[in-house]
Image: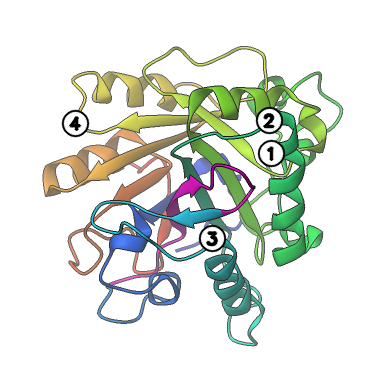
Amino acid sequence: MIVDHLRYDEVAFKASHNSIDRRASIVDQLSGTGGLVEPCRGLELDLVQSENRFEWRIQHGARDHGPELRNVLDEIAGWARSSDNWRHPVITIHFDLKNAHLDHTDFAAVFDAMLVDVFGRQRIYTPGEVTGHHEDLVRAARSGGWATFARLRGKFVFCLSGNGGRKVAYARHQPRDRVCFADYPGSRPARRKGNRVFANLFVAAAGYPASLGRYRLTPGFVARGYNIVTRGLWDLSVSGGASFLSTDVLDKREYSLSGQGFAPRFPVA
């Protein structure tokens, strides 16, 4: 399936929901191995920060003491640098912030520096690259500012989710210099200005189909549907034009896009 000419916001990606809780390892999820029907092109890492320092563990569900974030990121970066994967399709990682200790501005500097140290600046696609000469990220995205799928091969996109105060402060602080994007509740109308273009949508919410319809008609925004656990919700997300289909089901063929983990976001009728 050819999507190289499509912009990032015009492609749909299979993603794992609560990635650390899936039976397949993170590397298996990225590679499409370990019994998966296709690779995941998106991950979600739930982050719990230490109270007195900028250190994080990935914790969700039954995992009361999950792995250190830095160790998992090193594993992902190692996978990406291997000779088999160095030109991988763009990978998007959502960081679900479960708490927000210490100063927000200090968080932005430390978190960004860590990601650059692990992955290298050249492998990260940032909000500033989308914004370009435009006044802000939203105006740029609405004007077609996203790079194409082809240009993003070998790169990562990072997005902060979860704790509202922290991600809002992050997106507002020197937005052109930030390494991560930041999301907002997708039940709200699409913005006309500002620095957040990732919409986060709970698929079991009553307004989910209407929200997807709104983003289908609004260019430039990236709509993530999460907690897809039934075939009906998967089909609704595909037909509705979700950008990221964040699912717990990774090993059933009916929960796949193309066998490659991506497809055009807007199916041809």
Q: Residues within 10 Å of mark 4 (few under 14, many from 20)?
A: some
- CA distance separating discs 3 and 2: 19 Å
Residue type beneath disc 4? Ala
8 or 72: nearer the eye? Answer: 72
Q: Callout 3, which amino acid?
A: Leu
Which element is circle 3 on? helix
Residue 212 in the figure: left or right of residue 111: left
Label 2, label 4: how far apart the Cα atoms are: 34 Å
Q: Residues within 10 Å of mark 2 (few under 14, many from 20)?
A: few
Label 4, on which residue?
204
Q: Which residues are magenta?
A: 37-55
State the CA–CA distance, disc 2 to disc 1: 6 Å
Kindly report which numbered mark, 2 or 4, lies closer to the viewer in this rendering. Answer: 2
Q: Kindly indicate whether the residue at mark 1 contacts the one at mark 2 (C-beta within 8 angstroms).
A: yes
User: Could you tell me residue 117's position as x and y percent?
Assistant: 76, 62
Q: Earlier in the sequence, mark 4 or mark 3?
A: 3
Residue drawn 71% across and 22% down?
172
Q: Amino acid at mark 1?
A: Phe
Q: Residues within 10 Å of mark 1 (few under 14, many from 20)?
A: some
Image coordinates of residue 104 in percent, x first then y, are 67, 30
Mark drawn on residue 107: 1
